[in-house]
Amino acid sequence: MRGVNPRRAPRLLAHLLLAVLCLPSALLVHGIVLSTSSLQSCVRDGSGAELDVKCEKKVVVTLAVGNGASLATEQLDFSLMCIGSPDGSCPCPCNYQTDPTCNCRDLAAPLSLTVTKTPVWASYPMQYITSFNYKPYEAVVRPASAKCTDSDWEVAPTCGWYYVGSYKVPDSQGFACECSASQIWDSTLGNGNTERTRANINCDFFKDAIDIIVGKPPCSAHCLMFDPLWYSGYELGPPSLQFDITVTVDVPVAVSSSNTPSPAAAYTTNATMPNGTAGPPPSPSSPPPAGAPPPPAVVYRREMLGLSPSVTLAATTSRLVSTNLLGDLSTYTSLPELSTRLLMIPQPNTWTVEQILASNRSSWMLLPASSVDRDDTLCNKVGTVFSAFKHQPNACFRAPQSCLDNQIKDLQAKDSERVAAGKVPLYSVGQLTYGAASMMASFKGGPLSFAVPVPSQSNSLVVINVAADSVQLVTNASPGNISGAQICTYGESRCGGFEAGASRGYLKVNVTNTGYVAASFTLTLTKCSVNIRPVEARALSLAPGVLTPVEPYIQVYVEDPFYDEGRYCWLTLYDSQARVVATHLVTFYTNATVLDNKPVGGLNSSGDGAGPQPDNSTSCSVKCGQFWDLLCYARSKCWGKMGVLLGTTIGVAALIGTLVMLAKLGLLALCMSSATGFLGRCCGGTSKPDDKPELFKQPVGVNNAEPTVLTEQELRRAVK
């Protein structure tokens, strides 16, 4: 591309930027020249009082470098006839062979420049919080001494104390449970209302009668134990992009008189430019004419300029080339937001810190902050330890291992179940590598670093200033091929399809540069069947003749919950000139979304808000159908029923015996007559207070006669 009038450069740059932003992703290449212009660059030197102004003519090139430009697939050739000219004119006005003060050198070939970029990573700063156990668990102790202690002032509680150095950890002694009086009563009499004990202690009085009498009821101690494996917990800060851009500058310094190798600081190459002049190594797309004599060897001096978000400026030692990283254009897909999660890194006991941090990072875990307890106050959280375990509500009436669910081991098991079912894990960091487990190990950060790959397009704007007359862009173009394309579930548990709505597919595909030179390609997944979410194009740099898997895998989402065995998409591979070089049809199926089963049953009536209470009082009646079955009561330990039977029998026998004794003493008739008289007076009598017994009534038929008075002996005789 020829130089552009400086007055038109801003307008041209604006038009080119607009064109780049409007280009479809299928047409994006890795190093887009946004603008070129010729510029009279001047510098006012403030090191002295004279304030000298020095000017030189430069070519300014603005590039957009994509994150797929990992190979030198494009080349910028700058027309530069000489370097070091004292007056800026070429060829050199002096001869360095005869003039020792002459620093000017005539160049035999153009200056060559290539730009490459490493894969882009989103890097997250890490800050250590604390360590978390893999799976705390409960140990139950039933001491032979039948005595359990757990108070804070105990020197040697049943579970012992945990120490950190010489510091005794509060609440680390666990807790003790013992049979209460009601539990002993219920267990002994077997009334069916036995309360649960955490260790299933036998609270029967006859099991430990002597210990219970002396004040030592059955007891159990519940101790917190730890798995040997611990995890280090880290908070993650906001992400930043991490990548390196390398600008390779090849400056021709001389024409070698022979084809012998050059010194270490330079290299020798034979080359023929399209216009017939000597130059840097050409691509196979522009080989020298057949039968042409070999051109003279040209000696090049190579310099490597490094740019990154940390180093945005660089220049060659001769100041011939300077570069500036302006920044990055926004990606199509946002970076993962992980500030609400904690990173868990395993720390096996036998491993050093270096071994832990250098291990396969795809085994690390990302846990939501809501699933972690950093204050030791909540049950069933990662971080539940001494205080939460000891002070859990109704501890002695709950099942063993209560309060210790949802630990790291449990969450890993849930992830394994999801992967086995073809679903993406919820906690493994592998969910951020798009199913490619090897991706995490390729990040070249420090041993204590965490980063995830950024598959979305990330174009970096680089400005290159070269003291040259003009610039020419040479882009490599090669044919390519697509092979081995299939859609699998996460972890490749199965391939061919996935569950719609509840999962996603991971497209595994291999591409090959079938040409003879490294080149840029763009891979697209388009022309899909209905309800398949659009997929972002992937930029690739491919070495010739190498089968290359596309990583991270391409994610495929379906936007409906239906079963369909005939879904499809077309893979299209474009070369650097936006020409289609290969296509491939990808077919797959989706199963219908499997919704979770909803609970059924429960109370059929409306209820009063309290719910029905369980009734276990008939358990002995069910076991022993006959009321008088004493042997069944004894065999089933239905002591309450046996007591009722024995009490009833004894009561009836005592009543019968009392009645027989009263009859023998003659008191039974007296008691009965007294009772009858009492009942007559209280319940059935209608006589007045002045009524007299029959013995004192006037005989019938005697008129106005005095009553007969009986003597005492006659009265007794009459009573008998």
Image (spheres, rainbow, N blue to C red):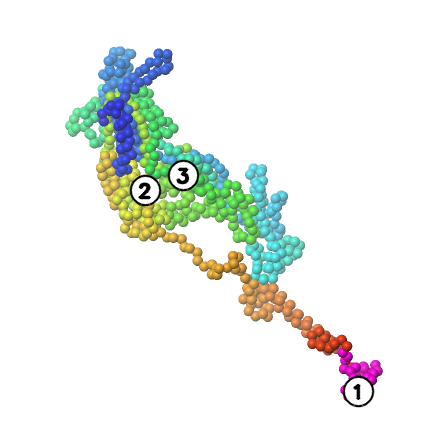
Q: Amino acid at mark 2?
A: Ile
Magenta region: which residues? 691-718
* Residue 220 in the figure: left or right of residue 10: right
* Residue 177 in the figure: left or right of residue 334: right
Residue nearest the observer in this picture, 136 or 451: 451
Q: Amino acid at mark 1?
A: Asn
* Residue 419 in the figure: left or right of residue 37: right
Residue nearest the observer in this picture, 130 or 287: 130
**Residue 313's spot in the image, x, y percent?**
35, 25
Residue indicated by mark 1: 703
Looking at marks 1 and 3 on the same chain, the residue that comes earlier in the sequence is marked by: 3
Residue that sits furthest to the left in the current view = 291
Query: Mark number for residue 337?
Result: 3
Q: Main secondary structure of the magenta part?
A: loop
Quadrant containing the C terminus in the rendered view: bottom right
Q: Amino acid at mark 3?
A: Glu
Residue indicated by mark 2: 554
Quarter of the rendering containing residue 694: bottom right
